Image (cartoon, rainbow, N blue to C red):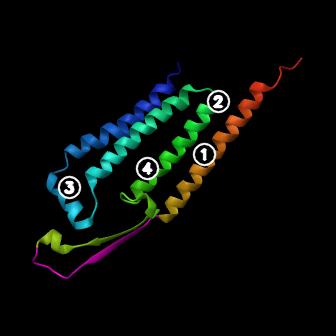
């Protein structure tokens, strides 16, 4: 068994499963409530999504690293891994909404932050990260094409008869 086959999934587990959950324990509950009520960001829900996605990515990485290059299992796990990484990136830059593709508009309500002292006033915060979303979509597509080309060439090399 290759060492990298276990090391990379372990790193994914550490950074995408363990670290976010440990850091979430240090966030005061008032901050979580304030973020959800005032801005509409469910931090605990985002951490849960990152955790589940991290477990999926670790499993895909393990399968991908253990499979041979000519195996359809490696091709499928490589494609699924690229799509899952793309989803995770779009989820994070979309602040919980991957379909926003990096364009985040949040209504900020001072009434929920300051209490009912201020009413009728709202502000909108806009974050435009569409360039990074498009860049990561391009990277994911190139990664999928590279996985297919690697699969195709290793499959042909495996089926070719040995030279005389």
- Residue that carries the numbered disc 4 in the rendered image: 88
Task: Identify the secondary structure beneath mark 2.
Answer: loop
Q: Position of residue 105 (x, y in %)?
A: 36, 70
Sequence-earlier tag: 3 or 4:
3
Asked if the residues shown at circle 4 and circle 2 are in contact, with their CB atoms under 8 angstroms apart, the answer is no
- Corner quadrant of residue 56: top left
Q: Residues within 10 Å of mark 4 (few under 14, many from 20)?
A: some
- In three-dimensional space, the C-alpha distance between marks 3 and 2, rounded to whole angstroms, equals 45 Å
Q: Residue at x 68, y 36 (%)?
A: 150
Choose the circle earlier in sequence order: 1 or 2.
2
- The image shows residue 122, relative to residue 157, as above or below, that is below
Range of magenta residues: 116-129
| Secondary-structure class at tag 1 | helix
Distance Cα–Cα, label 3 vs label 4: 21 Å
Residue at (39, 37) in percent of width and height = 55
As for residue 128 lying within the magenta part, the answer is yes
Local secondary structure at mark 3: helix
Label 3 belongs to which residue? 32
Which residue has dot 1 on it? 143
Whole-Å distance between the Cαs marked 1 and 2? 15 Å
Dot placed on the residue nearer the N-terminal end, 4 or 1: 4
Residue 115, image x, y percentages: 11, 72
Q: Which residue is mark 2?
A: 69
Q: CA distance from mark 4 to mark 1?
A: 15 Å
């Amino acid at each position: 068994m290759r060492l990298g086959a276990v090391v990379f999934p372990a790193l994914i587990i550490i950074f995408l499963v363990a670290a976010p959950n440990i850091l979430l324990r240090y966030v005061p509950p008032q901050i979580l409530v304030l973020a959800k009520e005032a801005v509409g960001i469910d931090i605990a829900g985002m951490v849960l999504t990152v955790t589940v996605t991290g477990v999926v990515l670790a499993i895909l990485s393990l399968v991908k690293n253990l499979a041979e290059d000519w195996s359809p299992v490696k091709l499928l796990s490589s494609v699924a891994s690229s799509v899952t990484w793309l989803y995770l990136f779009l989820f994070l830059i979309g602040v919980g909404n991957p379909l926003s593709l990096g364009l985040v508009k949040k209504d900020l309500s001072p009434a929920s932050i300051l209490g009912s002292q201020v009413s009728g006033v709202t502000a909108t915060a806009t974050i435009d990260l569409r360039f990074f979303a498009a860049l990561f979509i391009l990277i994911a597509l190139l990664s999928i094409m590279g996985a297919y080309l690697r699969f195709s060439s290793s499959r042909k090399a495996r089926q070719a008869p040995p030279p005389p």
